[in-house]
Image (tube, helix red, strand yellow):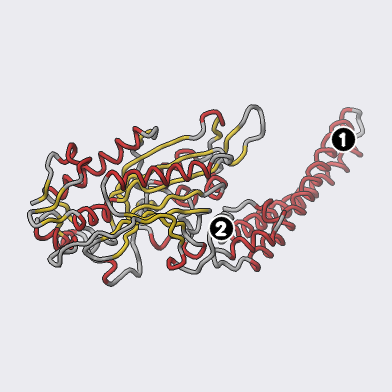
Amino acid sequence: MLQVNIIREDPDKVIERLSVKNFDAKEIIGQIIELDTGRRATQTELDQLLSHQNTIAKQVGELFKSGKQAEANDLKNKSIALKDEVKKLHDLLHKYEHDLHQQMVLLPNCPSEKVPSGKSAADNEVIYSIDKLPELSSEAQPHWELASKYDIIDFELGVKISGAGFPVYKGKGARLQRALISWFLDRAGESGYTEVQPPILINEASGFGTGQLPDKEGQMYLVGLDNLYLIPTAEVPITNIFRDEIIDAATLPLKLTGYTPCFRREAGSYGKDVRGLNRLHQFDKVEIVQISHPDRSYDILEEMKDYVVSLLKDLNLPFRVLKLCGGDMSFASALTYDMEVWSAAQEKWLEVSSVSNFETFQSNRLKLRYREHNEKPKLAHTLNGSALALPRIVAAILENNQTSSGIQIPEVLVPYTQFEKID
């Protein structure tokens, strides 16, 4: 959530920056300033009235002590009358705060000055791409056919058990999944990330803190009886570890990683782009999260992007790196890099990771602050990234590594799979 004081200081700049995300904020910004002005005026009036009430209370006590009961009772009656005014101002202040909050949560995060303008994914900036795309033989098959051929992923069985978008991994397919998870976690640990195993059900406060609520409420699975949500990514529970915390600046950055299953309704998704592993309702992912000092967050974003790139290089997968334009960014992000792998059999790019800096957007919602020396606490910056999401990585491994005698396993995974080939 944006900070009200930043909006008040330069509303035109906020409107201009949000326009890069193709978001017209002029009307909402006007309403926010009007509500905040009313809130501040009401707070001032309430503070003055409470101060006056305290003064009267002291005077009443002094008059009673000096035996001036008639004067004391007159002032006491005035104090009782003030209580109604205080209650009215409290109620008015609460309404202003509620209405202001309702408007504030409608505003997405302001994009960084580094974000290119654009309307859609077609306008994203390619900052790196492999020189030459791999070519497969005319007999090459997409991953869903390979999965059936080698009996490693059963999509129909998943439909029987749950529905479309819930595949069942079998035999070497299940072991490949487990190998990838273990390798991703081990690599993260070697890079200084502390592993955590968070809950996969979250409450509303956690969903709000990282920006999933109310923006993406319809994309999450709700366990209605207990009013809990299945997580769309481990980012949510891991970042919420630090909700309502004040962190010693000397300990920053904090680096955490975690594996979880992830759940997304993907409402409205259909067609060839959702076939096989391309888009699922349940999938596995290893996430990396950092809590950073504001002065270092963009350097850390570059480090996180380079870390994900190193994973793709070690898997020997063809990839490219995109800087997302304003029109393709998430609600909460200030700057995002996407990493995509080339699906040789489908002849298309598949997103496998997004690495984002949220600046203070999440930390303001989370009340996540840091303190330097004895100074007043300030909002930290939060960052996260997929390192990596498994379904499309598996799809790319199957498609790009297929041979006439089977599917070759990337060398770095062999110690984890205990086999070199799926055949």
Q: In which quadrant of the rendered view does residue 117 lie?
A: bottom right
Residue 323's spot in the image, x, y percent? 46, 57
The secondary structure type at the circle numbered 1 is helix
Image position of 178 (left or right of 11): left
Residue at image position (21%, 64%) is: 345
Residue 69 visible, this angle: yes
Residue 120's spot in the image, x, y percent? 46, 68
User: Which residue is nearer to you in this view: 87 or 338?
Assistant: 338
Image position of 74 (left or right of 399): right
* 365 w.r.t. 139: above or below: above
User: Which residue is nearer to you in this view: 206 or 71?
Assistant: 206
| Tag in front: 2 or 1 | 2
Q: In which quadrant of the rendered view does residue 19 lie?
A: bottom right
User: Which residue is nearer to you in this view: 340 or 131?
Assistant: 131
User: Which amino acid type is shown beneath numbered disc 1?
Assistant: Gln
User: Which amino acid type is shown beneath numbered disc 2?
Assistant: Val
* 3 w.r.t. 53: above or below: below
Image position of 7 (left or right of 172): right
Residue at image position (13%, 39%) is: 418
Q: CA distance from mark 2 to mark 1?
A: 45 Å
Dot 1 crowding, Cα within 10 Å, few <14, some 14–19, many 20+? some
Residue at image position (37%, 50%) is: 233
Residue 224 visible, this angle: no
Residue that numbered label 2 is attached to: 105
The secondary structure type at the circle numbered 2 is loop
Residue that numbered label 1 is attached to: 59
User: Which residue is nearer to you in this view: 50 or 228?
Assistant: 228
